[in-house]
Image: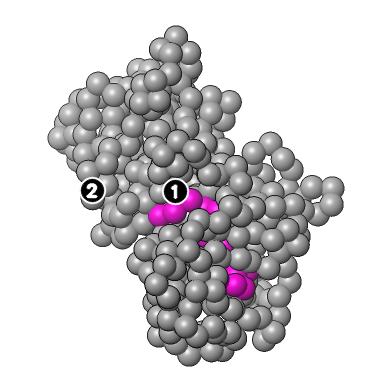
Amino acid sequence: MGSRKTDRREFLKQSASLAGAAALGATARSASGQLPGPEAQLRGTEELVGYGQRSRFVTSKRIPHGGRPSPDVFGLDFHIATPLQDQVGLVTPTSLHYVGTTRGAFVPDIDPAKHRLMIHGMVDNPLVFTMEDLKRLPSVTRLHFIECAGNRASRRHVTVQETHGMTSCAEWTGVLLSTLLEEAGVQEGGDWIVAEGVEEVKGASSIPMSKAMADCIVCYGMNGEPVRPQQGFPLRLIVPGGEGILNVKWLRRIKVVDQFYMTYNDYGHLRQDPADAALSLQIGPKSVITVPSGGQQLPGPGFYEVRGLAWSGAGRVARVEVTTDGGRNWFDADLRGEPQPMAHTAFSFSWTWDGKPCELQSRCIDEIGQVQPSRAEVARFWGQPEDQPPSVKGQDNSIQPWRIDSDGGVHNAIA
């Protein structure tokens, strides 16, 4: 495990060797005239034509999260985590996007032709929009992550799906909330909104007007198709960078008010300590290595591309650093593509493993200079005793360590 330049030189040497081996292999195959063919042929069906399906060899799937089964004996879903370890790129497929609890209620089955969104409260012109009304208005399409407060790493977790699977990133399409509020005419003193969804147990969230007018989106599209029922069909609110529960699903009502309202959603999420409350409202900076990560197996020493995701509720990811020696030395990772505000950013790092035990970590630095902390730094911030295992208050954006043993096994290294 040397410097990054050493890793790249070694990689180039190995690449040359691999290229030579590949050339020999190609010659041998050409001489024999034998190449393996497909095991079977897929015949077209109406279902394949209408919507398609993935290969039977691709088996990534979501899993229940938080110790509660989904679905339970009543058919209710709780938290469902996305398989980050299998994700390619930064956009989470719609079918694998994580799902947050519906507060003990079934997912509403809503006819979009009958659905309405009401804007009222401290406004000059209370308004009611149909879905067709909203789709006629100027739209935006933006990439944003959502993360649940339940995305908390623990030494009991094995895989990155368990430690970080309650975050996903998608392309969202809809109308800026500011467009609707400006049309309604916000009155003086209207400093907050309360957003409410259609649920058996009424879910609502209080959001500052400054945030509502800045970048919130009333979304009807997700990754190029209508938002799915588990994600809030036909309409959901996206609050970029904010705690997941603020992103109200099945959105039907927005009330402009003059103060913070304690709603069902806010109960248990509101903190009295101002510092804790601030950390709960806005997420990040945060990152996690997804390959190699817990539960995976390295076949042996040699070159590897370390890959992961980084994000921040404060804006764009500026840098990601990776350490392969437990934090003694840090190196800049490569960012994949142009980082977008409040969106996942994919990163990679070229590394040659020498076969010895080591510890991999990543940390995110966002555009306003915030640095992702270690769990020990978080404990010191809250004044926790040094002789106790560190715990994390507010949103957990602490560094996730992965231990690699000499046999290539990768394990959660949280003490």
Of 288 and 279, the residue lying toward us? 279
Res 281 label: 1
Q: Residue furthest top?
A: 387
Residue 178 on the magenta span: no
Magenta-tinted stretch: 241-254
Residue 253 on the magenta span: yes
Marks 2/1: CA–CA distance: 17 Å
Disc 2, SS: loop
Image quadrant holding the N terminus, namely top left
Which of labels 2 and 1 is toward the front? 1
Q: Residue at x 64, y 48 (%)?
A: 79
Q: Residue at x 21, y 39 (%)?
A: 332
Instruction: State whether residue 235 is above or below residue 347.
Output: below
Packing grade of label 2 (10 A; few <14, some 14-19, many >=20) is few
Packing grade of label 1 (10 A; few <14, some 14-19, many >=20) is many
In this view of the protein, can residue 79 be seen by the observer?
A: yes
Disc 1, SS: helix
Q: Position of residue 187 (x, y in %)?
A: 42, 75
Find disc 2 in the rendering and name its residue: 368
Please, what is the three-letter code of the amino acid marked with disc 1? Leu
Res 175 label: none
Q: Residue at x 60, y 60 (%)?
A: 204
The disc, 2 or 1, on the residue closer to the chain's N-terminal end is 1
Q: Position of residue 293 (x, y in %)?
A: 46, 34
Instruction: State whether residue 140 is above or below residue 272.
Output: below
